[in-house]
Image: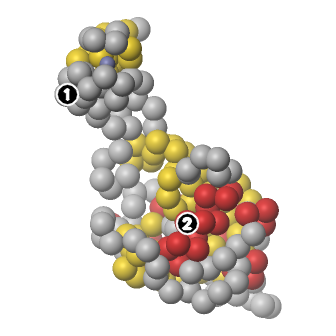
């Protein structure tokens, strides 16, 4: 089906009853609607959570290349209840890079809606933390092909290799932890 609004996903069939969905104009906008249940399946953005780990001495942020999209992103993924957002960020960090961090050490710094390379719209919450708060050695884990530390300048120079919007977040993350620490 097609719509005139950004969609988180396109439900071709009703998740409740399996009937093929239709569209219905409500409040001036076409909505995904089940004619059998007479229920609207709202196009809510899917929540995802990520974390920017900043090495203040090097002025770098940890990014990884996702094996399904070929794009670099911050360690991130879907929040699975009953996880808190910070718990999701810590789990994804460990799953994708092998670094461990206490969820309580994470600071919230960016909330936005962004489009995933596979087409969904995500409601994206990003935390920031200094690398000194993490433990373990970086190595690619589940879903990751390559894990690397990148400076905002290097990321901007090859912006097309990143998920749209992530380069700006990388730049802001370094500032969020107080900038590059030359004395470290
Ligand atoms: Zn239905």
Point out residue 180 in the picture as x, y percentages from the top left corner.
Answer: 70, 80
Which residue shows up at 23% across the image and 21% down it? 19
Q: Which quadrant does the C terminus fall into?
A: bottom right
Q: Residues within 10 Å of mark 1 (few under 14, many from 20)?
A: few
Vertical relation: 82 (above or below) 99? above
Point out residue 79 in the picture as x, y percentages from the top left corner.
Answer: 56, 51
Indicate the secondary structure of the residue bearing disc 1: loop
Vertical relation: 26 (above or below) 82? above
Vertical relation: 37 (above or below) 128? above
Which residue shows up at 23% across the image and 30% down it? 12
Is residue 155 toward the left or the right of residue 103 in the image? left
What's the distance in space between the residues labelled 2 and 1, CA to CA?
33 Å
Q: Toward which corner of the image does residue 90 lie, by quadrant? A: bottom right
**Residue 167 visible somewhere in the drawing:** no
The colour style of the image is secondary structure
Is residue 60 toward the left or the right of residue 23 in the image? right
Q: Mark 2 points at which residue?
A: 92
Indicate the secondary structure of the residue bearing disc 2: helix
Residue 154 is labelled as none
Which residue shows up at 28% across the image and 11% down it? 36
Is residue 166 toward the left or the right of residue 118 in the image? right
Looking at the rendering, the quadrant in which ligand 1 lies is: top left
Viewer-closest of 55 and 68: 68
Q: Nearer the viewer, mark 2 or mark 1?
A: 2
Q: Name the residue under label 1.
A: 1
């Amino acid at each position: 089906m097609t719509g005139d609004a950004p969609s988180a996903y396109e439900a071709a069939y009703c998740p409740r009853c399996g009937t093929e969905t239709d569209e219905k104009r409500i409040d001036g906008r076409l909505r995904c609607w089940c004619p059998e249940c007479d229920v609207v399946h709202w196009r809510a953005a899917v929540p995802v959570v990520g974390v920017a780990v900043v090495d203040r001495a090097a002025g770098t942020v940890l990014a990884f290349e996702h094996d399904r999209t070929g794009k670099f992103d911050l360690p991130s993924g879907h929040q699975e209840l009953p996880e808190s957002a910070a718990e999701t960020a810590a789990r994804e960090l460990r799953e994708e890079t092998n670094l461990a961090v206490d969820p309580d050490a994470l600071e919230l710094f960016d909330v936005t809606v962004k489009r995933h390379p596979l087409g969904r719209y995500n409601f994206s919450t990003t935390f920031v933390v200094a690398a000194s708060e993490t433990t373990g050695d970086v190595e690619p884990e589940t879903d990751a092909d390559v894990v690397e530390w990148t400076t905002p300048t290097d990321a901007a120079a090859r912006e097309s290799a990143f998920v749209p919007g992530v380069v700006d977040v990388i730049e802001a993350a370094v500032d969020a932890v107080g900038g590059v620490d030359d004395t470290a």
